[in-house]
Amino acid sequence: MNSCKAELLAKIRDRSALVGVVGLGYVGLPFAVEKGKVGYRVIGIEQNPKRAEKINRGENYILDVKDDELKMLVEKGLLAAETDFRSVPKMDVIVICVPTPLTKNLTPDLQYVESVTRSIAPYLRRGQLVTLESTTYPGTTEEVMLPMLESSGLKAGKDFYLAHSPERVDPGNKRYTTKNTFKVVGGVDPESLEVAMEFYSQTIENVVAVSCAKAAELSKVFENTFRAVNIALVNEMALLCDRMGLNVWEVLDAAFTKPFGIMPFYPGPGVGGHCIPIDPHYLEWKAREYNFSTHFISLAGEINRRMPEFVKEKTVRILNRQGTAPSRAKALVLGVAYKKDIEDGRESPAIDVIKLLLAERMEVVYHDPFIPAFREHDISMESVPLTEELVKGVDIVIITTDHSNIDYQWVVDHAKCVFDTRNATRGVKSGREKIILL
């Protein structure tokens, strides 16, 4: 064992290693807090100065982080945030948790990964571990990051260590957290894998080694592709049930009583968040390099992207049956977060629905207790209070996110009509004649 590796492993084991986390968002901040809780000193590199200032004041902005834990770590000097890379030479481990979006043409946009890697490379020194947690296509760590880092003159596996360990964060999930969710790790070489496994094992209960960084990258995009394909299947079933005059929720509930050979997935107004709408297209794009066509992924994306349009079309049908012209109608959209009980509107299908309704010249307002305002698709809106006057005054209430803190019986009691795309009104007893399901 070379000396720099032995020294780094010793620092990891006695937790004297200085950990850097680049990107203090939904992935990076919970990870930084977990490392701080077991005694590591953590410096976050967050290029949003407002977020960095909040961290240094001990103010939390991520739902999955406990306010008191963050404040305690800041007060003890175990967590601080900076807006540049000047501290990289002091860091022993650098964990990258930056966004990996898509371009308008559904191709990977690695600008953030590339920018961070270029920023780290001039400061790289012997005895450091660099890990990428951002979800991406197989080959990013070895083909994009490795050459950039080795431009420093240092060699991976000898002078520094490089690995991929994809994040598995489910915002709002109270059962599975950073600490107790299995962690997959793949290195660009055996030495890097050994160091990365030791690092992640210090704070995560179950760490799973795979043969290489590409395998780790592929495992994550497969996980999200699995979900995208199955959600597309039930979304297509919802479209068919609409044609057949059947209740898709009843059909699915019956199917899911089978105790083997099936797994519950549910339809909705589309898919949102970072993972499902984006990650499968990373795999789809990479497959073309191998002259391989990923038919399931392409079809699933097509079906899921179709759902906001279907919600708009069905809304128009409902209004027409009521004798209300869409251009003279007022709609209340309940929920713009991409999933229930979180403060996250990334890629939310509800926002696409709003855009499509506005294109029909409807008057649209929204209420979301978690998202007070949003600006997207050249649309800027603020959440309105959920009052009796508001609900009675609209022609249709469209439930696009099934937040738990909304009294759906109360909504149905006061609404003229409720179009429920999430089966949020499952428990509503009276007024069911007003409810139209997806």
Image (tube, rainbow, N blue to C red):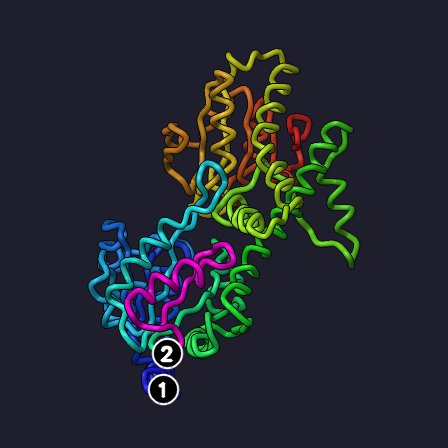
Query: Residue 126 at what x, y percent from top left?
Result: 29, 76
Q: Which residues are magenta?
A: 129-157
Q: Amino acid at mark 2?
A: Lys
Question: Is 251 placed left or right of 397 in the picture?
Answer: right
Tag 1, which secondary structure?
loop
The part of the image, by quadrant, that contains residue 395 is: top right
Q: CA distance from mark 2 to mark 1?
A: 8 Å
Q: Residue at x 53, y 39 (%)?
A: 401
Q: Amino acid at mark 1?
A: Asn
Q: Residue at x 49, y 39 (%)?
A: 348
Q: Please tell me whether residue 135 belongs to the stretch shown in magenta.
A: yes
Q: Please tell me whether residue 232 belongs to the stretch shown in magenta.
A: no
Question: Is 202 placed left or right of 436 in the picture?
Answer: left
Where is mark 1, residue-wise? 2
Query: Residue 363 at what x, y percent from top left?
Result: 46, 19
Label 2 or label 1, whichever comes before in sequence order: 1
Disc marking residue 197: none
Residue 187 shows in the view: yes
Tag 2, which secondary structure?
loop
Where is mark 2, residue-wise? 158
Residue 76 shows in the view: no
- C-beta proximity under 8 Å, tags 2 and 1: yes
